Amino acid sequence: MHSDLKKILFTEQQINSAVRKLGAQLSTEYVDKQPIVICVLKGAVLFMVDLVKRMEIPLEMDFMAISSYGDSSQSTGVVRILKDLDRPVEGRHVLIVEDIVDTGLTLAYLKETLLHRHASSVRVVALFDKPEGRKVEISIDYCGYTVPNDFIVGYGLDYAEKYRNLPYVGVLKPEVYCK
Ligand code: IMP
């Protein structure tokens, strides 16, 4: 375990098992729909890569990079698109891949944006759900694990751009924040 971590929440095996289950479920739900699977950069990259390998159906991949305005520690819900999708979503079934849903503000904005562009459907798959942090009501259609209200890192999730490459997910030691 990385020495900056207090504990491991999910091992590589537990993550793999959730990803396999979600992939199988999505393969059934999206059969014959050729969805556009959208990765929200950068946190969802590792999840997206593993998930699409478990989706045994034709699909397309696209990427979006967004950033919240204002104080980085407090999500405001006002989101700026840094990199937009390459292709239009009009008339297409869209699946947003998120690493973790906390306040729900980012996701609410993204869903609204894609529905505005006349996607046929917009659903969300999130590896982690942190329901205690929620500020807006938002439905997560497919979810891996519910997590407590701690700041977690690993498997794509970062603190100050670090720890994304850990193959497992853990809770940071409080002193790491105060350095
Ligand atoms: P929301 O708008 O508050 O739901 O923000 C979701 C985004 O905040 C996620 O996509 C992550 O990038 C980031 N985030 C929320 N909680 C955590 C965490 O515990 N660790 C790392 N990033 C987090």
Image (tube, rainbow, N blue to C red):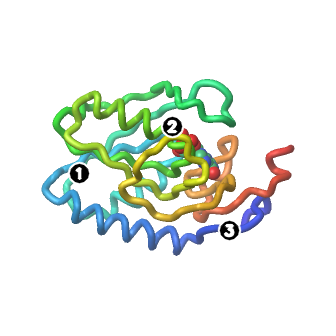
Provide residue 132's location: percent of width, then percent of height: 60, 53
Provide residue 169's location: percent of width, then percent of height: 62, 62
Q: Quadrant of the N terminus?
A: bottom right
Q: Is residue 174 above or below residue 2?
A: above
| Residues at discs 2 and 3 in contact (Cβ within 8 Å) | no
Mark 1 vs mark 3: in front: 3
The residue positioned 46% from the left and 34% from the top of the image is 65
In depth, the one of 11 and 98 nearer the eye is: 98
Choose top left, top right, bottom left or bottom right for residue 81.
top left
The residue positioned 38% from the left and 59% from the top of the image is 142
Q: Is residue 135 above or below residue 12?
A: above
Choose top left, top right, bottom left or bottom right for residue 87.
top left
Q: Is residue 89 above or below residue 137?
A: above
User: What's the amino acid at mark 3?
Assistant: Ile
Identify residue for label 2. 105
| Residues at discs 1 and 3 in contact (Cβ within 8 Å) | no
Q: Earlier in the sequence, mark 2 or mark 1?
A: 1
Provide residue 23's location: percent of width, then percent of height: 33, 64
Identify residue for label 3. 8
User: What's the amino acid at mark 1?
Assistant: Leu
- Spatial CA span between label 2 and label 1: 27 Å
Provide residue 127's location: percent of width, then percent of height: 47, 58
Cβ of mark 2 under 8 Å from ligand 1: the answer is: yes
Q: Crowding at label 1, few (<14), some or many (≥20) Cα neighbours within 10 Å?
A: some
In depth, the one of 171 and 164 nearer the eye is: 171
Disc 1, SS:
loop
Image position of 98 (left or right of 175): left
Numbered label attached to residue 59? 1
Image position of 151 (left or right of 61): right
Q: Earlier in the sequence, mark 1 or mark 3?
A: 3
Q: Crowding at label 2, few (<14), some or many (≥20) Cα neighbours within 10 Å?
A: many
